[in-house]
Image (tube, rainbow, N blue to C red):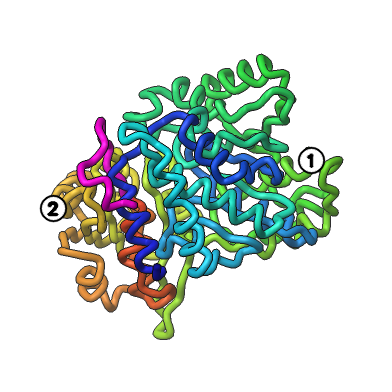
């Protein structure tokens, strides 16, 4: 089996859609020898900021001398981004080996309960982290929390970044319902740390934490200021945006709460935060000719609000061009309402996804909220960037898929179109035909 064949095998698992429940993952993990029982975890859920908070935690603990596993999703370009040890992507050869090991385990499941792509990848990651003898794994949920495949672990701490409206078709149409799903990662007696500021959502988290006798720490806006007098807080965070300061405060509170189990110095916290890297989130790139590109995966209303705040705070005096591509199952009209008014020129593009919103639809919505802007629709991101080749500041946003494509086109990441397609899934109520092709 080649790496390309392994990726194709995983790609075909998309046909089994997205299912909620832990039975498949528990059985698959048991077939793998229950590798999660040999590992320590910090489990991270939330609507926005999960990846950034995970990156901060990973950087802090790696700086402190631990061997740290990192499990996140989706990936921007390469599937290998999802599974890392000490920020080194899992090697292609290890992906091939793990897929080979996975194949006979999948045959143990009946057709109508076949593991999904995410369930399979979750167990692959557990097996690899155990084999790598990771001291700690920073473990991000995929979708929700309560019935997410990652929820088979018993963590040292449960972290909930925030609660906002997203994935309503799966998690519920109110922040209260969504909070109940995210808070499903709370375990009996395990500390909970959250930066949730929605009062109704926070009440749900407090109730579930109390029921589990899980100590709860709430990080407030005051904790987010990086200019506090203590040395751990005085640092220059390389990730832009006020929301990243909140994520940093959440990471610091988590590390502080676990110091009895994992001692970490204030200096390691500061150095870890100062050196953290997390691409595609308010990532500012300057080309050799002086042009600037701001890449941000603002794919929901909360993300669009954070991006707008950053644009107003850090780029308020600069005219910019907005390149926007959003998935159809997101609230793309509201995203347009928040981002279009700030732009002088707007170019809409389709996202490389079956679920994309049409560029003409996006353009029409942007014209409605900003009739003074020059608005056009392009067939793709490559065409859009050629069209605005002279513009000094370009903001590319609306979907992490689009950000990944931008990183490729701008030469900042190797091409990986086939691997970006692994982020897609198709909900199904029955198993696909020709299942033998997946074996």
Other residues around mark 2 within 10 Å, as few (<14) / some (14–19) / many (≥20): some
Quarter of the figure with the N terminus: bottom left
In what element is the residue under mark 1?
Answer: loop
Name the residue: 49% across, 31% down: 22
Range shown magenta:
424-439
Is 86 inside the magenta-drawn segment?
no
- Choose mark 2 or mark 1, whichever is in front: 1
Residue 205 figure quarter: top right
User: x%, y% of residue 404?
Assistant: 38, 63
Residue 417, position as x, y percentages in the image:
31, 66
Q: Is residue 26 left or right of residue 272?
A: left
User: How far separated are the C-alphas under marks 2 and 1?
Assistant: 50 Å
Q: Residue at x 51, y 46 (%)?
A: 122
The residue beneath circle 2 is 360
Residue 362 visible? yes
Q: Secondary structure at mark 2?
A: helix
Disc number for residue 192: none
Q: Residue at x 66, y 34 (%)?
A: 154
Q: Name the foreground residue: 424 vs 372.
A: 424
How far across and down, in percent of the image, does residue 308 sit?
42, 49
Give the residue pinned by disc 1: 258
């Amino acid at each position: 089996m080649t790496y390309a064949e392994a990726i194709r095998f995983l790609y075909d698992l998309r046909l089994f859609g997205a299912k909620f429940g832990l039975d498949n993952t528990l059985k698959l993990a048991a077939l793998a020898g229950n590798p999660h029982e040999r590992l320590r975890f910090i489990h991270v859920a939330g609507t926005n900021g999960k990846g950034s908070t995970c990156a901060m935690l990973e950087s802090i603990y790696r700086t402190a001398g631990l061997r740290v596993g990192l499990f996140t999703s989706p990936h921007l370009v390469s599937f290998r981004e999802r599974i890392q040890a000490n920020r080194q992507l899992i090697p292609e050869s290890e992906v091939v080996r793990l897929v080979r090991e996975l194949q006979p385990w999948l045959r143990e499941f009946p057709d109508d309960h076949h593991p999904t792509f995410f369930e399979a990848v979750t167990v692959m990651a557990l097996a690899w982290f155990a084999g790598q003898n990771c001291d700690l794994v920073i473990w991000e949920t995929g979708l929700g929390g309560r019935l997410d495949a990652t929820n088979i672990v018993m963590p040292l701490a449960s972290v909930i970044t925030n609660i906002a409206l997203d994935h309503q078709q799966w998690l519920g149409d109110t922040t209260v319902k969504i909070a109940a799903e995210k808070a499903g990662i709370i375990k009996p007696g395990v500390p909970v740390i959250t930066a949730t500021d929605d009062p109704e959502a926070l009440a749900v988290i407090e109730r579930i934490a109390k029921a589990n006798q899980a100590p709860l720490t709430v990080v407030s806006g005051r904790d987010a200021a990086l200019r506090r007098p203590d040395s751990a807080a005085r640092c220059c965070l390389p990730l832009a945006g006020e929301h990243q300061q909140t994520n940093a405060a959440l990471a610091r509170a988590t590390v502080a709460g676990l110091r009895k189990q994992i001692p970490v110095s204030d200096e390691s916290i500061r150095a870890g935060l100062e050196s953290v890297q997390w691409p595609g989130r308010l990532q500012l790139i300057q080309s050799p000719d002086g042009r600037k590109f701001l890449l941000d995966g603002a794919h929901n209303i909360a993300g669009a609000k954070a991006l707008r705040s950053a644009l107003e705070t850090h780029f308020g005096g600069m005219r910019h061009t907005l390149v926007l591509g959003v998935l159809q199952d997101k609230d793309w009209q509201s995203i347009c309402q928040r981002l279009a008014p700030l732009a002088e020129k707007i170019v809409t593009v389709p996202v490389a996804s079956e679920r994309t919103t049409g560029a003409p639809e996006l353009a029409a919505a942007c014209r409605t909220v900003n009739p003074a802007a020059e608005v056009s629709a392009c067939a793709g991101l490559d065409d859009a960037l050629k069209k605005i080749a002279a513009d000094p500041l370009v903001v590319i946003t609306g979907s992490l898929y689009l950000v990944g494509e931008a990183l490729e086109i701008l030469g900042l990441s190797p091409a990986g179109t086939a691997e970006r397609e692994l982020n897609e899934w198709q909900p199904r109520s029955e198993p696909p035909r020709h299942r033998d092709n997946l074996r």
